[in-house]
């Protein structure tokens, strides 16, 4: 893997809260332009990792870099490169979708005219043009997620970090949203890091996945590579191997509690 292809890198990254180790010597490399799925149960360390990448909490040891910039020492420079979509996007409910985007654009240094022009194009792109002039307080969760992606794109980031982007969305909306996320990588060349427990959606759009258990990344790679590794170790599962089966086997191998088919 060429050095210049790596845009997100962690080296022996550790985060402790008292006697609890939330992230345990994480070594991760994410290529520019790929979709990377970060999987694991609640408390596995996914959110803490995200906070360190965003420069919102300092590591106990090790380091995290984005585009060669230290996420702790150069957090302002990192924030200019990274857009963050939380699991519950917040907007001003008495403002319309369009007004929220324009306000966000101006807060990120655009003139009103530039913000209005960019908002117009993004509303069309995320399928929200018809609802653009409705107050966001009337939006469904799926509509807020779509607007959230538009909001993130207002700053034109190289990297987008998403926390449970498809949670609570109906199947049709989920399909459309995952297609849009994939397009951001393939068409725009943006790097996407998704933290999620929605195994099927992650399998559909991710180039590679990382499996987190108890603060440690126990497996990382393409889904086919993870399946092949398990087969070489004597594991048995259905032909092709679904991500759910792969996750279950790695989870149990790492000594996790009994897996019930969900990783909420």
Image: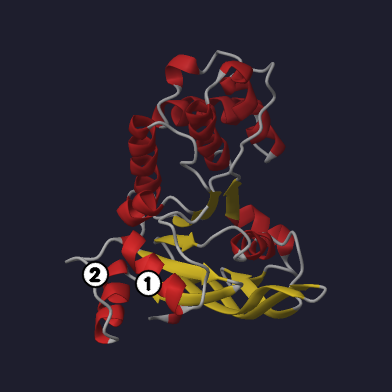
Q: Position of residue 196 (x, y in %)?
A: 49, 53
Q: Is 109 left or right of 152, judged from the image as shown?
A: right
Q: Is 218 left or right of 234, judged from the image as shown?
A: right
Q: Position of residue 141 (x, y in %)?
A: 53, 29
**Circle 2 sits on which residue?**
237
> Residue visible at 61% across and 15% down?
135
**Circle 1 sits on which residue?**
249
Q: CA distance from mark 1 to mark 2?
A: 9 Å
> Residue visible at 32% across and 70% down?
222
> Residue visible at 33% across and 42% down?
179
Q: Is 263 left or right of 54, judged from the image as shown?
A: left
Q: Give the image quarter of residue 17.
A: bottom right
Neighbour class for label 1 at 10 Å: few (<14), some, many (≥20)? Answer: some
Helix, strand or loop for disc 2: loop
Q: Residue furthest bottom?
A: 233
Q: Earlier in the sequence, mark 1 or mark 2?
A: 2
Structure colour scheme: secondary structure
> Residue visible at 62% across and 60% down?
50
- Viewer-proximal residue among 216 and 95: 216
Tell me whether the residue at label 1 lies in contact with that at label 2, contact meaning CB atoms closer than 8 angstroms.
Answer: yes
């Amino acid at each position: 893997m060429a050095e210049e292809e790596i845009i997100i890198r962690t080296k022996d990254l550790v985060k402790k809260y008292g006697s609890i180790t939330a992230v345990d010597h994480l070594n991760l490399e994410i290529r520019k332009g790929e979709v990377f799925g970060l999987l694991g149960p609640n408390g596995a360390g996914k959110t803490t990792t995200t906070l360190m990448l965003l420069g919102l909490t300092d590591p106990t040891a090790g380091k995290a870099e984005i585009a060669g910039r230290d996420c702790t020492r150069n957090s302002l420079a990192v924030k200019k490169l990274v857009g963050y979509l939380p699991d519950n996007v917040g907007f001003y409910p008495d403002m319309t979708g369009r007004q929220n985007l324009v306000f966000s654009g101006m807060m990120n240094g655009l003139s009103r005219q530039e913000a209005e022009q960019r908002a117009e194009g993004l509303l069309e792109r995320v399928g929200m043009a018809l609802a653009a002039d409705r107050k966001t307080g009337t939006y469904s969760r799926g509509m807020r997620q779509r607007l959230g992606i538009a909001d993130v794109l207002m700053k034109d980031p190289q990297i987008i970090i998403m926390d449970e982007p498809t949670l609570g969305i109906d199947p049709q909306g989920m399909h459309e949203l995952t297609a849009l996320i994939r397009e951001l990588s393939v068409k725009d060349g943006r790097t996407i890091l998704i933290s999620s427990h929605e195994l099927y959606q992650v399998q559909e759009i991710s180039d590679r996945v990382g499996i987190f258990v108890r603060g440690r990344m126990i497996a990382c790679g393409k889904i086919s590579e993870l399946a092949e590794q398990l087969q070489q170790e004597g594991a048995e599962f259905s032909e092709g191997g679904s991500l759910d089966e792969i996750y279950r086997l790695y989870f149990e191998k790492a000594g996790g509690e009994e897996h019930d088919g969900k990783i909420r």
